């Protein structure tokens, strides 16, 4: 049933170029049988990262192949969901089929059939799709039927029984963001001012982590769309918010200076899913402040050369999707903050109770200004 051997980092699945790690490789071997060091999953759902999904959707809207067709083509050609344009992928929800006899990774002890989510990117996960069943455009989630194989080094976790699988998958997809924001918040000075660019699910969880970790922080958010800003205001996650295109660095700088008296923010956290937002992040930050980039559309060249070109002496930090304890921290944030949980449930199309609706209507009159 299992092929003998295998490498803990998944090197045995790399087809080309030889010698690269799975994430950097052009193509992976996504065939049976599994190797004895692997966990074998039946795949039910893909959660495509925002940058990748938006790019695929742009191709579809321009008259090209559908999102489903593009996903099928990428996985067929590469043996993984690794968008060649954005370089990003997402993560998956599945059920454990079997553990190889030498597998010693995070899924040890789980029974076959257990619902699990991967916490490593689909850009390094060997994946075979039998069918794409449904594309949920609003949530970037794709129902599929297929198989995946995880080496022992790949982070993964059993799904929590108390949260809807669709919600848990959405939270776990970006759980590195709130975990790192929690760590950053602990280092900021008293009453520091923090700006988050992008109020998608990663932005929401980042704000929730900042608010929970440091209630003294003054938090602001910018997004292209008014609706998500209204939601984060209603959830009391921000002290100020404004609708603006984060690709317009001058406009974002003007907003930042209006809020901070031209001082700039102590930290700017970029959760934007579209390219071209690097300079807005830098210009909104004070000298020797922190710029944290989580969006997969971020360009290192634009960040580094742009900061140099405008003479900005700021600390640049690239978000790591893996932080020790990140899954538990993100899920606990959602459990502890009812407003955040129901905000995400609304976005995901999950039903709300009448009690929650009444509570939110009762509190809507005293939203923070934005």
Image (cartoon, rainbow, N blue to C red):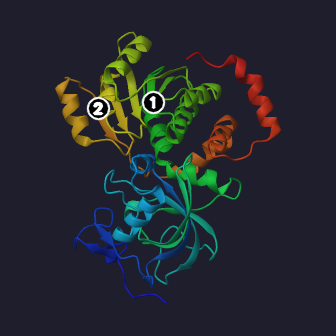
Q: Nearer the viewer, residue 186 or 273?
A: 273
Task: Give the image location of residue 93, x and y in percent.
Answer: 56, 62
Residue at the limit of the structure toward the top, as seen here? 261
Label 2 to label 1: alpha-carbon separation? 16 Å
Image point (30%, 23%), residue name: 283
Q: Quadrant of residue 162?
A: bottom right
Q: Earlier in the sequence, mark 2 or mark 1?
A: 1
Task: Give the image location of residue 278, x and y in percent.
Answer: 31, 33
Image point (50%, 24%), residue name: 219
Q: Is residue 96 above or below residue 336?
A: below
Q: Quadrant of residue 293?
A: top left
Q: Is residue 34 left or right of residue 226?
A: left
How would you rate the neighbour count of disc 2 (Cα within 10 Å): few for under 14, some for 14-19, many for 20 or more? some
Task: Give the image location of residue 266, x and y in percent.
Answer: 38, 23
Mark 1 lies on a secondary structure that is strand
Q: Is residue 363 above or below residue 11?
A: above
Q: Is residue 232 above or below residue 18?
A: above
Task: Check residue 196 in the rendering and tell me which mark sits there, or answer none.
Answer: 1
| Residue 221 seen in the figure | yes
Q: Quadrant of residue 10?
A: bottom left
Q: Nearer the viewer, residue 177 or 361?
A: 361
Q: Nearer the viewer, residue 206 or 47?
A: 47
Task: Check residue 315 in the rendering and tell me which mark sits there, or answer none.
Answer: 2
Mark 2 lies on a secondary structure that is strand
Image point (34%, 69%), residue name: 77
Q: Is residue 106 above or below residue 256?
A: below
Residue at the limit of the structure toward the front, as seen here? 63
Image point (33%, 78%), residue name: 12
Quadrant of the image containing the C terminus:
top right
How would you rate the neighbour count of disc 1 (Cα within 10 Å): few for under 14, some for 14-19, many for 20 or more? many
Marks 2 and 1 close (CB-CB < 8 Å)? no
């Amino acid at each position: 049933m299992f092929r003998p051997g295998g490498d803990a980092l998944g090197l045995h699945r790399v087809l080309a170029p030889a010698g690269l790690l799975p994430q950097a490789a052009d193509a992976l071997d996504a065939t049976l049988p599994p190797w004895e060091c692997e966990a074998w999953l039946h795949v039910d759902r893909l959660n495509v990262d925002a940058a990748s999904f938006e790019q695929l959707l742009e191709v579809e809207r321009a008259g090209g192949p559908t999102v489903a067709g593009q996903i099928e083509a990428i996985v067929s050609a590469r043996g993984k969901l690794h968008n060649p344009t954005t370089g990003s992928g997402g993560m998956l929800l599945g059920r454990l089929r079997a553990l190889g006899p030498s597998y010693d990774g995070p899924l040890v002890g789980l029974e076959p059939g257990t619902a699990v989510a991967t916490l490593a990117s689909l850009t390094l996960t060997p994946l075979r799709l039998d069918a794409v069943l449904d594309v949920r455009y609003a949530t970037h989630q794709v129902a599929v039927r297929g198989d995946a194989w995880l080496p022992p080094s790949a982070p993964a976790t059993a799904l929590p029984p108390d949260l809807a699988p669709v919600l848990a998958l959405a939270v776990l997809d970006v759980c590195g963001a709130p975990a790192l924001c929690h760590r950053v918040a602990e280092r900021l000075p008293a009453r520091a001012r923090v700006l988050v660019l992008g109020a998608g699910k990663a932005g929401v969880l980042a704000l929730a982590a900042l608010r929970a970790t440091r209630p003294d922080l003054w938090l602001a958010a910018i997004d292209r769309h008014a609706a998500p800003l209204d939601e984060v205001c209603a959830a009391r996650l921000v002290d100020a918010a404004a609708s603006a295109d984060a690709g317009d660095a001058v406009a974002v700088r003007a907003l930042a200076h209006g809020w901070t008296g031209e001082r700039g923010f102590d930290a700017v956290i970029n959760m934007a899913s579209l390219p071209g937002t690097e300079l807005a992040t830098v210009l909104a930050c004070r000298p020797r402040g922190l710029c944290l980039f989580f969006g997969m559309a971020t360009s290192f060249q634009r960040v580094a050369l742009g900061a140099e070109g405008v003479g900005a002496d700021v600390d640049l930090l690239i978000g790591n999707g893996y932080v020790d304890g990140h899954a538990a921290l993100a899920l606990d944030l959602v459990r502890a903050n009812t407003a955040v949980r129901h905000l995400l449930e609304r976005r995901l199309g999950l039903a709300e109770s009448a009690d929650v609706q009444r509570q939110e209507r009762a509190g809507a009159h005293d939203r923070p200004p934005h």
